[in-house]
Amino acid sequence: NPFLGWRGIRIMLDHPEIFITQIRALLRSNQYANNMKLMLPMISDVSEVDEALAIIKKVYLELIEEGIDVPMPSVGIMIEVPSAVHQMESFAKRVDFFSIGSNDLTQYLLAVDRNNKQVAGLYDCLHPSVLRSIKYVIDIAHQHNKPVSICGEMAGDPASALVLIGMGIDSLSMSTGSLLRVKCVIRSFTLQQAKELADASLTCESASDIRAMLFNALEDVKLSGLVRAGIQ
């Protein structure tokens, strides 16, 4: 299964010569802009973060010694593997920010390949275990004053975005095609209302219960038509 294989940070750490070349180029490109953020994907263990950070720092110091005055960028990680969720306390002491990869996190938590038609119906980002995992990530990150963003289909779904905002997510990454629908929905609710919906969602026992509750909330503000196709 390629989704459980040689991906992301695993390739870079197995081939540090490639990683070093890439980091060196990235740091040099940021010499004058000083606005770079590096995000490490497919992190599943603290040792991977420690090794990657050591390489980044080594490259940074080498450039400084060469007289190339580059700033040290912020470094964050993707939270897309269940094991990463349960190591948040350790990660929060090491990195500057987090981004939740909702697509991969959902399929790994639910053991569902979303590209497999036989089990695709089991894939649901509003599954209680997914929402509770996301909430935990946000809470731990914020306890350490670290921002959390989220990407994937969930961020661009209006009903899901409302719940995410209620949970305290700091930013949503979505395609331009989703912007207007999401904007329309989140501007129709107060932050307190979003928090109440998020709290209620976290107590539900099934994704269908959560979807029904969100549909009713959107129906109350006459916006259910924006997400009707996604409500089951």
Image (tube, grey):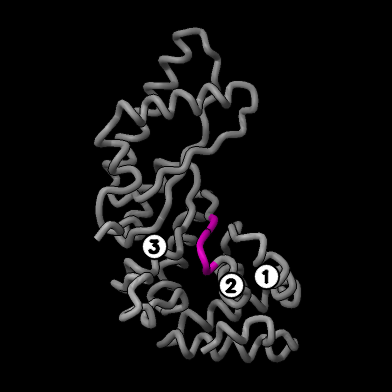
- Badge 2 marks a residue whose secondary structure is loop
Q: Determine contact: label 2, label 1, CB under 8 Å.
A: yes
Residue at horizontal 39 percent and vertical 62 percent from the top: 104
Mark found first going from the N terminus, 3 or 2: 3
Is residue 150 magenta-colored? yes
Q: In the rendered image, which residue does mark 1 sit on?
A: 182
Q: Position of residue 6 (x, y in %)?
A: 26, 48
Which residue type does callout 1 highlight? Answer: Val
Question: Alpha carbon of mark 2 to alpha carbon of mark 1: how far?
Answer: 7 Å
Q: In the rendered image, which residue does mark 3 sit on?
A: 104
Q: Position of residue 66 (x, y in %)?
A: 46, 8
Circle 2 crowding by C-alpha within 10 Å: few under 14, some 14–19, many from 20: some
Give the residues in magenta: 149-154
From the viewer's side, name the closer residue of 113 and 132: 113
Residue at horizontal 55 percent and vertical 91 percent from the top: 212
- Badge 1 marks a residue whose secondary structure is helix
Residue at horizontal 44 percent and vertical 23 percent from the top: 24
Q: In the rendered image, which residue does mark 2 sit on?
A: 157
Q: Determine contact: label 3, label 2, CB under 8 Å.
A: no
Q: In this image, 128 relative to 171: left or right? A: left
Q: Is residue 137 above or below residue 202?
A: above
